[in-house]
Amino acid sequence: MKIFKKVLIYLIFPLAIIGLAYLIVESVMEPVRFNNEKAAREAVAIQRLKDIRTLQNAYKAEYGKFTASFDTLKSFFTDSSMKVVMQIGSNDDSIAVVNTERLKKRNPRIKPEQMLELYRKGEHLVFRIENEIPVRDTLFNDRKDFDLDSLAFVPFSHGDSILMQAVVKTVSGVKVPLFEASMTYKSLLKGLDNQLRINLDAQEKERNEKKYGTADFSGLKVGSVTAPNNNAGNWE
C-alpha cells in the first residue's frame, strides 16, 4: 500500500499535472497558431484576388465587359494587346501649349504620330498618343511572384477552384458590367483545425448579417455581381 501511495504521489500525480498543463497550453496556442496561419494564407489569397481584379479591369477597358472565364483572362494576358495612352509634355508648360495650338492651327489634320516625330526633333509640344502594347509587357512587370497558371485556384487548397462570375446588370436604367471572384475559408484553410474553421464561418456569417443584412458567405471575395461596389475586396 505504501509503495502504491509513493507511485501515486511521485509519479502519477506529477504526470497528470504535466499532462493537464500541456492541455491547457495547447488549448491556448492552437487558436493562436490557427490565426497566424490564417493571416499568412489570407495574404497570398488577397494578392491573387487583386491580380484577378487587375486583369479583369484591363479586359473590360478593351472589350467593355468582364469575363467569367479564367481561360479567357489567361489568353488575354498572353496573346492580346491593350491601348495605353501616353502623355507627352506637360499641360502646365505654357510654351508647349502655345506651340501645340499654333501647330494644330497650321495643320488641323496632324496626327499624334507626326507630332511625336516633331517632338523627337526638338519641338516643344504637349499631346497624347495611343499605343498598342502587349498585355504581358504591361501588367505585373514588377511582380516576380506572379504565376498565371495558379490564377484560377485557391491557394493551399490542393486544387480547389476560385469561383468567378460576370454579368451585366441594369442599375438605375443603365447597363453596368459586374464581376465577382471568391473563395471560401473552407478551401483556403484546408488542413487547419476544422472546429476553429467552423467557428470562424459562424463569426463571419454573423458579421455579414449585421453589416450587409445577409449572411452572405464566409471567405474572401473581390467585386460583386449583385450591386456595383467599384470592384472592392471584402477585406478592404
Image: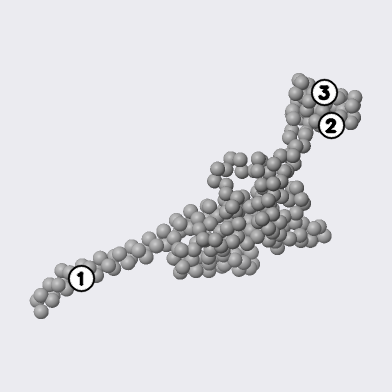
Q: Which residue is under mark 3?
A: 99
CA gap between label 1 and label 2 equals 91 Å
Viewer can see residue 61:
yes
Q: Residues within 10 Å of mark 2 (few under 14, many from 20)?
A: few
Tell me the residue at 75%/23% (across/down).
120
Q: Amino acid at mark 1?
A: Phe
Tell me the residue at 82%/23% (across/down).
99
CA gap between label 3 and label 2 equals 15 Å
Among the two numbered marks 1 and 2 on one chain, the one whose residue lies closer to the N terminus: 1
Scheme by which the image is coloured: one colour
Percent x, y for residue 119? 77, 24
Viewer can see residue 92:
no
Tell me the residue at 71%/39% (across/down).
133
Looking at the rendered structure, the secondary structure element under dot 1 is: helix
Q: Which residue is under mark 2?
A: 111
Contact flag, marks 3 and 2 (Cβ < 8 Å): no
CA gap between label 1 and label 3 equals 94 Å
Q: Is residue 82 above or below residue 170?
A: above
Residue 69 picture quarter: bottom right
Residue sitting farthest toward the top: 122
Indicate left or right for 200 with 229 as reference.
left
Q: Which residue is under mark 1?
A: 13
Q: Residues within 10 Å of mark 3 (few under 14, many from 20)?
A: some
Percent x, y for residue 185? 53, 63
Q: Is residue 163 above or below residue 91?
A: below
Percent x, y for residue 215? 61, 68
Q: Amino acid at mark 3?
A: Asn
